[in-house]
Amino acid sequence: MIGIEHMASAGSLSIGIDVGGTNTDAVVLDESNCVLVATKQSTTDDVTDGIRAALAAVLDELGMGRQRVSRVMMGTTHATNAIVGRRGLGRVAVVRLGAPATTGFPPLTGWPSDLRAETLAGAAILSGGHMVDGTPIGAVDAGAIRRFLNGLDGPIDAVAICGVFSPSFPEQEREVEDIVRSHLGDSVPISLSHEIGAIGMVERENATVLNASLNGVAKNVSHGLMTVVQEEGLGGASVFFAQNDGTLMALEFAVRFPVLTIGSGPANSIRGAALLSGVDNAIVVDVGGTTSDLGVIVGGFPRESTMPREIGGVRTNFRMPDIVSIGVGGGTLVNIDEGTIGPGSVGHRLQQEALLFGGDCATLTDAAVHAGVAGESFDGRALPDLSSRVENSLESGLEMAHGRLAEAVERLSHGKIDQPLVVVGGGGVLVAEDLPGVVTILHPDHGGVANAVGAAVSLVGGRAQRISGYEDREQVLESASHDAIERAIEAGADPLHVQIIDVVETPVSYSAEQSIRVSVKAAGPLARLGATATQPAAPY
């Protein structure tokens, strides 16, 4: 304890927290990103209790060093759980600017019926939107917007506004926002699609509606986290949330854009794996209690998916890491009668239901212990006497798990066998050391809490997109870079050190002129007190 307190006195400390389906992990890092304290606590049905337990555990071990904690960063599954479980979602009024061009495909088409009924207060397709070259499809009709809002039955918890090609031409969405605010007042939150999703109207609109429906959830989560932070005497610490692309956002930004926290868990694991392993390019497998999530480190950040992603049965197109999830985890059930594994899992009930802990469920954790590959992970616990039938099932189950992991690695490697595989997560013992197609396997120190480490070390990010003719490429790059930096600063980045870290240019098919889609990502360290508003030139 004396050593920890001495190290803590050298500078400010950061706490990273990550809420998983089985465990809630927390770590304390010093200014050099060295892990001082780490813990794994069971995720509870009310996840706030698991956060409270994890935070209390690391602070108790830190002792007087808690006075040096200046930042708390968290990755959370609250938004995902709310969508998948249809819990706590608000009723959203949807305004689409795209008539008459988009009337054949109404808002929320294709949504699961129960989720649509839970979230939709009403929808209207009104005049507005733009062509790919910026030509307006129609002008904003303020009267039609007011008539739509007046005609809604029941309460409105939030409003979602989506215009055709608004990421490149956002002016009409902002105009409608002003009309809605003047009509409903400032208490009703408004989500604008150009701030949330990419080019692609339907998926972007879906993401915007989900974001609007999560406003109440986001407020409750932020309030709960701040309550826990204040209970532990950390009221002076800044609080940040992890988002999908491996960067952070300030508390106020997270309340405005809760949908961007979906996918933060795998992104945290990848960022944490990059730091702990010291490699900037690799495949990462995070083996948890319920699933194994595999992703790719590219330049220290998660490789992002180029495909639309489904969340709770809804297609969206906001940034998400390129993740392959498989049903292989420490709590995955080994089905004795069927000779298979999964898809069920005991999840956070592992220490009550697994054979190793006196339960009656055979799991992959039991299989790892039986095979002698679990090391000292379970404090010398031994399995009870097993029948030969159960032993054979455990052995075949572990072999199946190895096969599924090897297939997932092959899918992500794109044939490159020289990439190392970084194994993190509490169930890392399930990864075979002779996994086919992998030359080097790394098991970094503190890999069991890599997700929390990733939350604590992440930079703050922002993104902007544009579509334009190729002849305006330089001007568009400059404009998008400026907006990406502004959004990173708004999310909490240091204005003096934020910079462009990724630029993607994609030709636009079937356009009348030679056009390109530009996507720019900016990131920087967390802002410190005393930073000025001066910002650097945007390299691209």
Image (cartoon, rainbow, N blue to C red):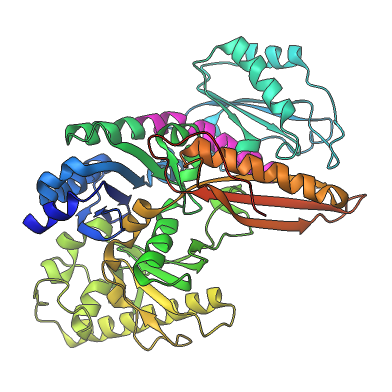
Q: Is residue 450 magenta?
A: no
Give the vertical position of 257 relative to 431 (above or below): above
Q: Name the side, left or right, on which 43 lies relative to 411.
A: left
Kindly tell me whether residue 365 is visible in this rendering: yes
Give the vertical position of 114 relative to 363 (above or below): above
Q: Residue at x 48, y 64 (%)?
A: 300
- Magenta region, mostly helix, strand or loop? helix
Give the vertical position of 86 relative to 338 (above or below): above
Q: Could you say where residue 127 lies in the image, as x and y percent from the top left?
A: 80, 24
Give the vertical position of 418 relative to 536 (above or below): below
Nearer to the camera, 59 or 350: 59
Q: Residues in magenta?
A: 196-220
Q: Could you say where residue 283 lies in the image, as x and y percent from the top left?
A: 47, 73
Indicate the quadrant where residue 206 lies: top right
Q: Does the magenta stretch include residue 206?
A: yes
Q: Residue at x 32, y 84 (%)?
A: 396
Q: Residue at x 61, y 43 (%)?
A: 484
